[in-house]
Image (cartoon, grey):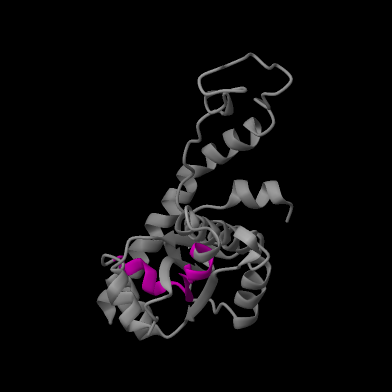
Amino acid sequence: MEFDKAVLSRRTCRDYSSETLSMGKIADILDIARFSPSSGNLQNWQFIIVRDQEKKEKIADICKGQTWMSDAQAHIVVCNKSKEVEKNYPDRGKLYATQNCAILSANIILKAADQGVGSALVGAFDEYELQKLLDIPEDAIPEMVITLGYPESLDEDQPRIDLKYLCYFESWGKKEDKKDFWPVTKHSKKLVKKASQAKTRASTKSKGLIRKAKNKLKK
């Protein structure tokens, strides 16, 4: 998949199918993501791959009761070992270490989209409880939980602010009419098409949630 397509097609997935996501596919995703840039190439990240159903349910509970997470085939807990970064960059090392893990997390979900795998970034959790559940040491801070699995449906498209409202030139607040700069039509047709498909996906998602609710009631 070309990069633009991976970025434009990626949507948060909160509705996963029961199709097995192989460890090989997870390894492919993480193997590419580890080439993300980091401050001083210190690569201050480590992963905990969680596939055990009971643990996934406990993680979902720790993540503010987001029960949909337990349907994902895997949780990737991205941990930040920031000490060396802070040592090398005393003034801003803590920030750099967090930024490194954020860049890595973005590349994980983009590579997942490239592989046809759904994902969601979850940052709302009880840090202490997550560390305790997964035996994470004090010097490794859990920064992000990333859910992975094949999607039953994806969240609807979300509007994006037009580039011309996001850019200043040379200094804050300075706007110019750079007619050769604004790619105002480059993705417009794709976005219009995606918008027209949003209702269909929303309907599919609703049916999927209803089906899951019925299955749970049967149990």
Q: Which residues are magenta?
A: 66-86
Q: Image check: 181 left or right of 103?
A: right
Identify which residue, 62 or 186, lies in the foreground. 62
The quadrant holding residue 114 is bottom right
Q: Residue drawn 65% across and 25% down?
A: 184
Magenta region includes residue 128: no
Location of the C terminus by quadrant is bottom left
Q: Residue drawn 69% across and 31% down?
A: 186
132 in relation to 95, above or below? below
Q: Residue furthest top?
A: 177
Location of the N terminus by quadrant is bottom right
In the rendered image, residue 204, in percent from the top left (x then y), is placed at 45, 55
Magenta region includes residue 74: yes
In the rendered image, residue 206, in percent from the top left (x then y), is placed at 37, 55
In the rendered image, residue 168, in percent from the top left (x then y), is placed at 57, 23
Identify which residue, 83 or 66, lies in the foreground. 83
In the rendered image, residue 8, in percent from the top left (x then y), is placed at 61, 46
